Image (tube, rainbow, N blue to C red):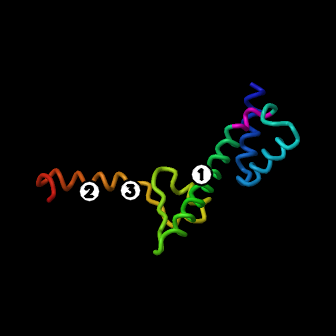
């Protein structure tokens, strides 16, 4: 029971840190040769932070390259359930719509239910 209590306290404390601080803590531990083994209960937090920053960086790089290739102002829209979270860490995402796919499916359904296939 003591391990659960200690783990919960550590997770709460690290959860209160800014994501930058959690990444810095992970980098420092790895640089010191400690790695993740002494703190296995922190691994999910570090993995989550790394995934978030990794995807945000990947989106930013991709959008920047696409914008450099086209001769018009391209907008970047994030869709899906985690769109807001990703947009909060991205410098290129301009707007989010978590339900865009469902909205499109509803439009298709409405077009096809009433009068058959649209011409």
Q: Residue furthest toward the right? A: 32
Residue 28: which disc? none
* Residue at far left of view: 115
Measuring 72% from the left and 36% from the top, which residue is drawn there?
Answer: 8
The spot of residue 59 in percent (x, y) is: 56, 57
Where does label 1 land, which residue? Answer: 55
Give residue 104's position: percent from left, percent from top.
31, 55
Q: Are marks 1 and 3 in contact (CB under 8 Å)?
A: no
Which of pointers 1 and 3 indicates the residue nearer the eye? 1
Q: To which residue does mark 3 refer?
A: 100
Q: Residue furthest bottom?
A: 72
The residue shown at (28%, 53%) is 106
Q: Residue at x 52, y 51 (%)?
A: 82
Sequence-wise, the earlier of marks 3 and 2 is 3
Disc 2: which residue: 107
Report which quarter residue 26 is drawn in: top right
Q: Please name whichever residue, 74 or 92, is drawn nearer the observer in this view of the structure.
A: 74
Badge 3 local density, few (<14 within 10 Å), some, or many (20+)? some
Which residues are the magenta region? 39-43
Q: CA distance from mark 1 to mark 2?
A: 30 Å
Residue 61 in picture, x, y percent from top left: 60, 60
Quarter of the N terminus within the rendering: top right
């Amino acid at each position: 029971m003591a391990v659960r209590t200690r783990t919960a306290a550590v997770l709460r404390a690290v959860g209160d840190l800014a994501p930058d601080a959690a990444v810095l803590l992970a980098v420092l531990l790895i640089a010191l040769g400690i790695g993740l083994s002494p703190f296995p209960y922190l691994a999910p937090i570090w993995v989550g932070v790394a995934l978030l920053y990794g995807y945000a960086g990947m989106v930013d790089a991709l959008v920047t390259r696409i914008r450099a290739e086209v001769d018009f102002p391209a907008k970047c829209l994030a869709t899906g359930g985690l769109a807001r979270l990703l947009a909060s860490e991205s410098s290129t995402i301009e707007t989010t719509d978590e339900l865009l796919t469902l909205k499109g499916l509803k439009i298709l359904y409405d077009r096809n239910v009433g009068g058959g296939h649209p011409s």
